[in-house]
Amino acid sequence: MSLALKNVILAEKAGFCFGVKRAVDEALNAKNKFNKKIYTLGPLIHNNDVVNFLIKNDIHPISLDEIDTLEEGDIIIIRSHGVSPKVLELLNTKKLTIIDATCPYVSNIQQKAKKYFELGYNIIIVGDKNHPEVIGINGWCDNKAIISKDGSELNHLPSKVCVLSQTTEKQENWEKVLCSITKMCKEIVAYNTICSATEVRQKSAGELSKKVDVMVVLGGKNSSNTTKLYEICKKNCVETIHAENSNEIPEDLIKSKTINNIGITAGASTPDWIIEEAIDKLKK
Amino acid sequence: MSLALKNVILAEKAGFCFGVKRAVDEALNAKNKFNKKIYTLGPLIHNNDVVNFLIKNDIHPISLDEIDTLEEGDIIIIRSHGVSPKVLELLNTKKLTIIDATCPYVSNIQQKAKKYFELGYNIIIVGDKNHPEVIGINGWCDNKAIISKDGSELNHLPSKVCVLSQTTEKQENWEKVLCSITKMCKEIVAYNTICSATEVRQKSAGELSKKVDVMVVLGGKNSSNTTKLYEICKKNCVETIHAENSNEIPEDLIKSKTINNIGITAGASTPDWIIEEAIDKLKK
């Protein structure tokens, strides 16, 4: 019987991205500064553990439908995904104190959507139509964007288009959409706005998953970028597992004596403590 | 023995395009107006029959190397392909009378190359690096353009690019180059500047060549757009023939009693008289 420890390798750039870290920090800073109940418009990030940690710190998610329950001067945080100008206007009308934690990379996409829409371009967003970031960006071009997952559903496009992507989109989907558009449009302005953290995270997860026996992807089940990491790893490594935290890592993987090389990656909304717990558990 | 006449079908939009017709008209008008020897910078169009017709009208091609033989006030025509600003400057320095017959669609591409180059974009031209139109466009971005035939030779591109195409490029090549670029560049401005006459000519030739027994493509052997028409037709119809004029149509095709359906198309620099002669000969 071998007594060798498991070899657990963490992918480069796994976990919290700049925009998510900034949003969490701003929420905690706001709590310290105002010392009263703080609201976030929707769960601050797609990670239940972090959301529960924030609730314990009196930072509570609230949906747009419930916004009328807030009072003038109440503090509301816009999460890293950003919102449409209409939502911003509504919060202002309610005279709430707004802390805008929109990721600056997302703000940049919103401004491009606005600019090119006003210049007469038809906006195309490569992304998930139900993702809050995409819904927010679409609000900056009067909700008239064409939203495409991988280009397969596109036909009869207008001639003049501006193409943008969700920050956490897969490069593969970006390329597929652009190739489709090329067949139909005459004038194309395309900004690949997949953020560099996403790019490095996906690339390193892809590479690591080729070398290990099992790949563990840590992150919220409702996290778009975590799901994409899972898809990328699953292509290379059949034994890929999606777990929200260390409790969801299967016991037989932890106890296995035949599996020696385990790779770990984590979505942009997975905090370091969850990654560390998972590594500890697997190494035991 | 069947006595039925051959069915000879001419493709839509075959022959002279707007830019070529305009250049030939300008040359003939100049001859009438000035009533002296006229020069064209290079053969006015890629068609020997037309060039010979022009020479008979005292309109002579001259190369850039021979430009020193001209005298102040001599009349020189810039052909539809256009030239670089450096060449324009040289002609001006020589105090020649310049008639600029650059196709307005080509001028538009030149201006885009200049504008985006000055804005810091790297220019990519989809086209033949030895074609005078491409050489001319490249001159408007300091001869720094990356020129690509079908994208296969591209790697390590700069992040920010502006993509333009030769007016007579194949749509298929445009799409291939764009798909390659999409993998490498972050910011893409792409104008599909294949001219609509080329597009319609290629499309109708492609469709017709699927329906006929033999396809005849009329045009100069050194004509880039004629060669592309030939390639498109050859894919659909093995019996595709490239002929400069009716004299080059094989005798056995003319005399054949089994071939009944013949398609004809012609490059942008093929005048109507050559098309008519070919139809007459095949119908006989």
Image (tube, coloured by chain):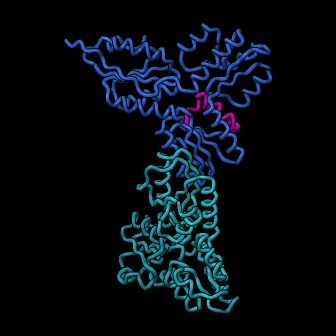
Chain colours: A cyan, B blue
Q: Quadrant of residue B11?
A: top left
Tell me residue B83's x, y (percent): 67, 28
Q: In this view, does A153 lie to the left or right of B257?
A: right
Tell me residue B280's x, y (percent): 39, 12
Could you tell me which residue is drawn at 43 percent across and 54 percent down?
A154
Q: Is residue A95 left or right of residue B282?
A: right
Q: Is residue B281 visible?
A: yes
Could you tell me which residue is drawn at 75 percent across and 23 percent down?
B91
Q: In this view, does A241 lie to the left or right of B151?
A: left
Give the extent of the magenta segment: B126-143
Q: Is residue B138 one of those drawn in magenta?
A: yes
Q: In this view, does B174 lie above or below A227?
A: above
Tell me residue B141's x, y (percent): 69, 38
> Which residue is at the front of the view, B154 or B169?
B169
- Quadrant containing the C terminus of chain B in the rendered view: top left
- Quadrant containing the N terminus of chain B in the rendered view: top left
Q: Is residue B135 one of those drawn in magenta?
A: yes
Q: Residue furthest left?
A: B1
Q: Is residue B133 above or below residue A24?
A: above
